[in-house]
Image (cartoon, coloured by chain):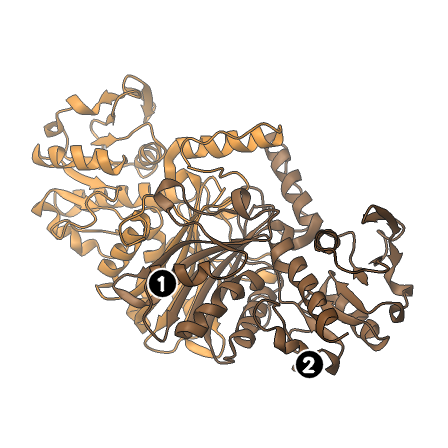
Chain colours: A orange, B brown
Amino acid sequence: MAVVGATGLVGEAMIEILEQREFPVENLYPLASDNSAGKTIFFNEQSRKVELLDSFDFSQVDIALFAASDDVAMQYGPVAAREGAVVIDTSAAFMDEPDIPLVVADINPQQLVDYNLTNIVVCPGGASVPLLTALAPLHRQVGIHRLNITVCQSVSGNGRAGVEELAAQTAALLNTREPQTRVFSKQIAFNLHPLAGAVADNGATSTELQIIRATRALLGNEYLDMHVSCVQVPVFFGHSATVHIETDSPISAWEVRDLLLEIPDLDVIDEPDAGGFATPVTEAAGNDQLYVSRIRNGLDNENSIDMFIVADNVRKGAALNSVQIAELLIAHYL
Amino acid sequence: MAVVGATGLVGEAMIEILEQREFPVENLYPLASDNSAGKTIFFNEQSRKVELLDSFDFSQVDIALFAASDDVAMQYGPVAAREGAVVIDTSAAFMDEPDIPLVVADINPQQLVDYNLTNIVVCPGGASVPLLTALAPLHRQVGIHRLNITVCQSVSGNGRAGVEELAAQTAALLNTREPQTRVFSKQIAFNLHPLAGAVADNGATSTELQIIRATRALLGNEYLDMHVSCVQVPVFFGHSATVHIETDSPISAWEVRDLLLEIPDLDVIDEPDAGGFATPVTEAAGNDQLYVSRIRNGLDNENSIDMFIVADNVRKGAALNSVQIAELLIAHYL
């Protein structure tokens, strides 16, 4: 097993989850692109040296978990796949490839049957996995024909550099120094930005398009009427989303709650007046659970539901699903 | 002229704006409910003692600007109106009264004609004024039949106590001390909450209902299909909103931009890839402008527009509109 981007936030979480779930790894190869190569990481209490991605021979491994940028995935994913490793990629690089299956382990494990068309499997981004985990059962039950979603992305969506920038800017401002911007184009401390990621020609960002494509693919409706806005917020860990859903059949907020409670690893916390709501800091960060709060019908409208979803984007959103996909591959295909 | 809640954030901004616009005030009476009475404030370089609201005789003034809580407005608004002052209220207390006009000075000044039905005029909340300023011209041009809005509320929506709590919690966390919660029910520093304000029986919050009611009233469609989620974010000043709009007639993002540019005090900042977007800190805070970014059509859909709106909730959202309403009253009715 190789982990590409092993020293990043998602890579580290993958290695931690491999340990916690006692994944049968014979040899773990932590890989990184340049400045992190040579560092030491620990796996099952044994030290491993981080190797250089560029010179790695992927024929040594069955599975390569990619926790790197779109560019790195685009460059090295096909190489690894050609050399015989099954690539599980968390970036948006292969989002538009019709032959590459997009898999959330809890929702569409059957799609993995197509893994060998290209030897690449896509794990949808940090915001999509939790969203789809909550939406898929609802879609099966009452049919979703419309979605409006605003995602509030935490700075860890930009990796460790994003986390460090929020911390450094906050400390600077509290000491009345000028905050420095590197990762984000404007101050992010005590602020929010109306986008996360690069902007495409049509005005949507890559993250927004990724969420729309993943949702349409996983709900099996490529024309689903769907509108997504991503906002970058000064939160370290945990992507949140306000979700507006229009359904084919009427459903009450209580029925939605009962349906969601059947989903493994999903908690409903919903007594908002008594402080009964989930937040990134108090519930999501560091956990593999997904949390749903504020489930309510539209005013006088039983065909519409609003709710709030929050989960740790690094663990629940990216790392855990990748490891779960690897488990399914081992169990059924490799 | 009386200002109720004169030592609060909105009250202070009202007094500042009265000065800046050279509003013809003969005597300014700053009022407060208890612990702030006796303090001194300055108006046009003259000191004024803050008087106790409870014992004030409103027959001395023509206009009373209310920058207080729903409870204070509910208790003292009708008293002031009965004693002969025209009350301009920024709270949600009179939101549901059919005889009380809801006015945004730039949009429906003609509604002021009904001011003397009750002697009370409502200025919609900090999030609604900027939203409606941008939406009303669009509605006139192409007809809006559906709105999905997520508002990211800054902590100044909870007054000075909200601002102080975010600052204190942030400082505590950077010094590895436990953050204290008083105003907000959970940690707000580096976090967000899926609600702002109290929750009603139907699961919506008072703020969400207020935005829906104000929008329906001002766009003149009490059945407008509208869904709002409010999120509390760790930003000091400036409410932001992601807005999804469905229109009766098709309109391109460029046409929307041209239409918005005709609105006074509205700036379009929209080259997002080059850092061309507005944020609470870098544009909105402390300004009377309203900023719009990321104007885009839905994917393959010229009857849908998404955009981002941000403005200073204290100044643009509440204080400025109240003073503008007072100016209209003086000019046309008093």
Quick one: SS at disc 1? helix
Q: Which residue is mark 2?
A: B114
Q: CA distance from mark 2 to mark 1?
A: 35 Å
| Camera-nearest residue between B216 and A17 | B216
Looking at the rendered image, the quarter that the C terminus of chain B falls into is: bottom right
Nearer to me, B144 or B181: B144
Residue A270 at what x, y percent from top left?
52, 61
Q: Which is nearer the eye, B90 or A66?
A: B90
Tag 2 subunit: B
Q: Is residue B184 visible?
A: no
Q: Which residue, given by chain and number where applicable, does mark 1 sit on? A: B255
Is B300 placed above or below A41 here?
below
Query: Which residue sits at x=86%, y=47%?
Result: B46
Q: In the rendered picture of this protein, how many numbered marks are placed on residues?
A: 2
Residue A299 placement, left or right of B172: left
B213 lies left or right of A326: right
Q: Note whether residue B282 is visible.
A: yes
